[in-house]
Image (cartoon, rainbow, N blue to C red):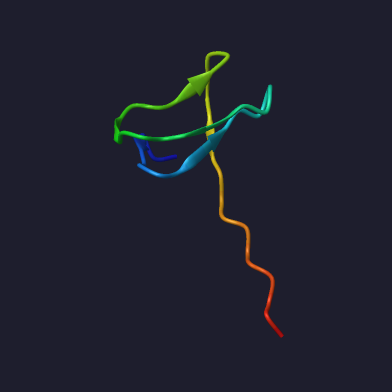
Amino acid sequence: MNDINQVGKRYLCAQCGLTVMCAKGGSGRITCHGEPMELQTTKPLPSSD
């Protein structure tokens, strides 16, 4: 996993469900409950058909 926080990306705590958005990038990891938070993936938009 990449150890750089990405500006504008959302991170999720798998243990409690907390979601945070990174406002300032940098090295290191965003953590919750002593564990690194997971980078959330984007959800596909519904088709306009």
Q: Residue 7 at x, y = what percent?
A: 35, 42
Q: How many marks?
A: 0
Q: Residue 45 at x, y = what percent?
A: 63, 67
Q: Is residue 25 left or right of residue 30?
A: left
The one of 28 and 24 positioned closer to us in this rendering = 24
Q: Residue at x 53, y 14 (%)?
A: 34
Q: Residue at x 56, y 51 (%)?
A: 41
The answer to whether 23 is drawn above or below residue 28 in the figure is: below
Quarter containing the C terminus = bottom right
Q: Is residue 14 left or right of residue 38?
A: right
The one of 27 and 1 positioned closer to us in this rendering = 27
The one of 22 and 4 positioned closer to us in this rendering = 22
The answer to whether 33 is drawn above or below residue 46 in the figure is: above
The answer to whether 41 is drawn above or below residue 21 in the figure is: below
Q: Residue at x 68, y 80 (%)?
A: 48
User: Hey, which residue is sitting farthest left in the picture?
Assistant: 26
Q: Is residue 2 left or right of residue 11?
A: left
Quarter containing the N terminus = top left
Q: Residue 10 at x, y = what percent?
A: 50, 40
User: Hey, which residue is sitting farthest front in the picture?
Assistant: 48
User: Hey, which residue is sitting farthest top in the picture?
Assistant: 34
Q: Residue at x 62, y 27 (%)?
A: 18
Q: Is residue 32 left or right of residue 47?
A: left
Residue 9 occupies quadrant:
top left
